[in-house]
Amino acid sequence: MIEQIDLRSTTTNQPPAPWEDVPLSQWNDWKWQLTHRLNSVDDFAKVINLTPDEIIGLQAPDRFRVDVTPYFASLMDPDDPNCPIRLQIMPTAQELVAFDGEMTDSLAEEKHSPVPGLVHRYPDRVLMLVTTQCASYCRFCTRSRIVGDPHATFSLRDYEQQLNYIANNPQIRDVLLSGGDPLLLPKQILQSLLNRLRAIKHVEIVRIGTRVPVFLPQRITEELAAMLGQFHPLWMNIHFNHPNELTPEICAALSRLANAGIPLGGQTVLMAGINDCPNIMLDLVHKLVRERVRPYYLYQCDLVHGAGHFRTPVSKGLEIMEALRGHTSGYAIPTYVVDSPEGGGKIPILPSYLISASDTRVVVRNYEGFISAYAQPTDYKPHNPATCRQCQEQTNPAIGVAALLNGSKSSIAPEGWHSQHQR
């Protein structure tokens, strides 16, 4: 395995046409990649055979921003408009069509932002938006309302407000840096943010959400990986949608991160025409695990403008989960979630393996349809919170269904329910 990693990290593919005359020293320079991104009809016409649908999308006056690194553009099939790489980054006329249920801010992040750029949706963790810029722009972007907009930037003043909020709320133990893409920040700024977060005693974990290793693997240098490795426990979730993205360059970048001790997770959006196939998803998760990336989330596509044509029924996601569970190792199986509209958070959607239950037995099925009974214990002594040190030290009260189960609440009622039922 070590020899394979060493081989990949020293192997660089020759740039394809129309960049065949570009010196490898430039092709492998991440700053060159950024400054030579493709964004116009003329740019893309040199690389692919554009369809009328793509030309309409590229020329639309109010379209979401287009910028594609030469590296990622080189992975597109020039003759196939249904290429899964091409579909993710090429605008089309379809994304200009509104659909039922679409929202500007489908996850209600702005309603959960106590200070600019900080989303506090869950009790013990926050999302810290640090930039609106990306190496390339996904056509299904959840934050297309701000991402890519050069006027919607986050300043040092915003960072101070975010960090002060985190420091003044001791229940926050987990901070996720996102945006935009944090790995596009200047190294000094990113390092400073990580230093500041590490100085807050109650922040236990820092995470980075990124797609830079996929769009711009040249950015993942040994120097950057070593810098990130100073801030453990530091976790990283990387966005992959198709096995074709796992090129030698990307695998070398992943090796640098993993060798720096950074646990890597994979996030995927389920999309029509790209990965809505159990076999494609199985291929993707196998390749990710082989590169030391554990599949983390499989997202149902969000209700954002421009993403309507990517959406699949939830039943397609359940079909894919049925094809994964039992057919491959548990390490390779992501959690399928709907990030519920209007700020409800991530809700796991799973096939049902529990068929029935009594006070003595539960009846379960496996992935093959084999049905068996599991005998429940008859002498179980329930956990006693009164004698549990962890329960006594818990300062955050249980909410939701957890509060019903521990007895601190007896019911959960919709707003206005009690007054509506007064007679």
Image (cartoon, helix red, strand yellow):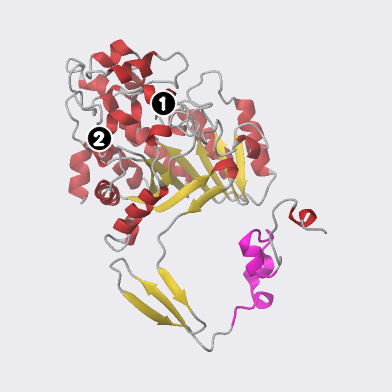
- Tell me the element at label 1: helix
Vertical placement of residue 86 versus 371, above or below: above
In the image, 138 versus 315, the foreground residue is 315
Q: In the rendered structure, does residue 390 fall within the stretch colored magenta?
A: yes
Q: Which mark is residue 164?
A: none
The residue segment tinted magenta is: 382-407
Name the residue located 60 percent from the left edge and 33 percent from the top edge.
Answer: 117
Mark 2 vs 1, N-terminal side: 1
User: Residue 129's x, y, as percent?
Assistant: 55, 34
Q: Is residue 278 visible?
A: yes
List the residue tagged with mark 1. Answer: 95
Residue 293 shown left or right of residue 143 in the figure: left
Q: Residues within 10 Å of mark 1 (few under 14, many from 20)?
A: some
Q: Residues within 10 Å of mark 2 (few under 14, many from 20)?
A: many
Residue 203 shown left or right of residue 47 in the figure: right
List the residue tagged with mark 2. Answer: 249
The residue furthest top is 42
